[in-house]
Amino acid sequence: MKAILKKPKSSAYPQMIALGYLILIITGTTLLFLPIASRNGISPGFINALFTATSATCVTGLVVFDTFTNWSLFGQTVILLLLQIGGLGFMTIITMFSFLLRRKIGLKERELLRESVNTMYIGGVVRLTKKILIGTFLFESVGALILSTRFIPRMGLAEGLYYGIFHSVSAFCNAGFDLMGRFSENSSLTLFTGDFVVNFTIIVLIIVGGIGFFVWDDLTKNKYQFKRYQLHTKIVLSMTAILIVLGTVSFYVFERTNLLLDMTIGESIMTSVFSAVTPRTAGFNTVDTSALTPGGRLLTMVLMFIGGSPGSTAGGVKTTTLAVVLISLWSSLQNVKSDNVFGRRLEDNALKRASAVVTVYLLLVFVAAFIICATNAWIPLEDVLFEVFSAIGTVGLSTGITSSLNTIGKIAITLLMYCGRVGSLSFALLFTEHRVSSFIQNATEKINIG
């Protein structure tokens, strides 16, 4: 009887989610490997299919070849479905079918849901999932309709609507996949640099998809009463606003005599805002990424590394992780014992978890960079670093080296994308969660720090 009633260990849930994403990637790889998925009717090869399926499932946007030029309608549809499932989380999709079939959601599924959407409480997780599904449908539908008004005049009714849907889903899921290869291969949204409607719609979809589902719930409950928001929501909104403002100003300063030189003031500001938002972690670009100044590249890599917020469609180490590190740093400089913000004290192990996340991500970045440099020696180091930061942050921006990577390089990037997506949900927890509790502690001894 005890064995039957025994609860699964909490550490098993992240592993189950990681396995779920792996199964989804394998399924996508199998479908994209079929000749029917390619526009020319020839199989793209296993590695290319695996890379694309991983990029779509992990809502990254890095591609070995242009999505429109090389994938048939069947292949594009597979990619779109992987984007949607990967962005929302496969457990959310499974729960949606449970709703439709009027099937009861069990305790184990609720715990998996809590882990999948990265909310702090199991209570109300089913209600939150309903909000996620309804909110996603509404935002993506409105975004698709708005984008269609700009695409239909160029492409016709049917194709314009299809492009609106594809790019709305891709933006909301922070993926960065595009079909603009119809006009110019790997051009992303550079044809719409001066289009306010397209830029603003994509920006809003990226931000809404990237702030996190827990924040959605808090905002719908407390509306505009900032003081009533939970601490998590306050930190997410504050960090998001700070990063957008600082990113916009910094991008303008770095690129004002380069990419922004021939633009009007309005276009320069719009491009700067877009370029501050999309690295966290959407992957669209309205300017040539390979032509960025060194300062612009460094700024983009920093934003890619930070990413969006927990429990969202975005990747990266997350805004809350950065906030915890900065708050703890400020407390140390002031010689304050506890880490306080917005009139609240952070839990004691917050810095430990945040440090673990940052350390794991950096280790993965540098290991992958070493592997790629060793096997693709002709690629400049700055391009390699840009690529690996883009992969681990599930961003999708590239300086154009993705297609030139050899098999080892593609595998390294594939693993980074997978770790980056799973990491945003559970990868870091596998390293930080205490498996065995012990009341015995070793003797303390001091070491010099710094």
Image (spheres, grey):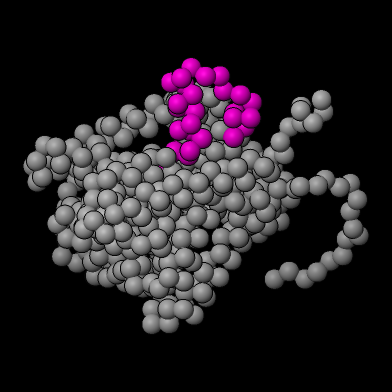
Apparent side of residue 153 relative to residue 35 in the rendered image (left or right): left
Q: Is residue 103 magenta?
A: yes
Q: Position of residue 97 (x, y in %)?
A: 45, 26
204 to the left or right of 336: left
Residue 163 horizontal/vertical position (percent): 21, 43
Determine which quarter of the picture holds residue 157.
top left
Which residue is at the far top? Answer: 102
Compared to residue 173, the image places residue 249 above or below, namely below
Residue placed at 76% from the left, 27% from the top? 5
The verdict on residue 125 being magenta is: no
Q: Which residue is located at x 37 percent, y 32 percent?
A: 136
Residue at (18% x, 52% y) in the render: 192
Q: What span is in magenta?
A: 87-112
Up the image or down, 90 lies above or below 22; here it is: above
* Vertical arrangement, residue 302 with respect to residue 154, above or below: below
In the rendered structure, the answer to whether residue 407 lies left or right of residue 289 reads right
Q: Is residue 447 left or right of residue 60?
A: right
- Of residue 306 and residue 424, the one placed in the foreground of this image is 424
User: Which quarter of the rendered picture does the C terminus lie within?
Assistant: bottom right
Secondary structure mostly seen in the magenta stretch: helix
List x then y, in percent, for residue 430. Answer: 66, 50
Residue at (41, 29) in percent of width and height: 133
Instruction: Pick the residue in front: 253 or 104.
Output: 104
**Quadrant of the image containing the N terminus:** top right
Tell me if residue 18 comes above or below residue 377 in the rendering. above
Q: Residue 394 at x, y = what percent?
A: 44, 54
Examine the rendering and report whether any part of residue 96 can be seen: yes
Q: Quadrant of residue 402?
A: bottom left
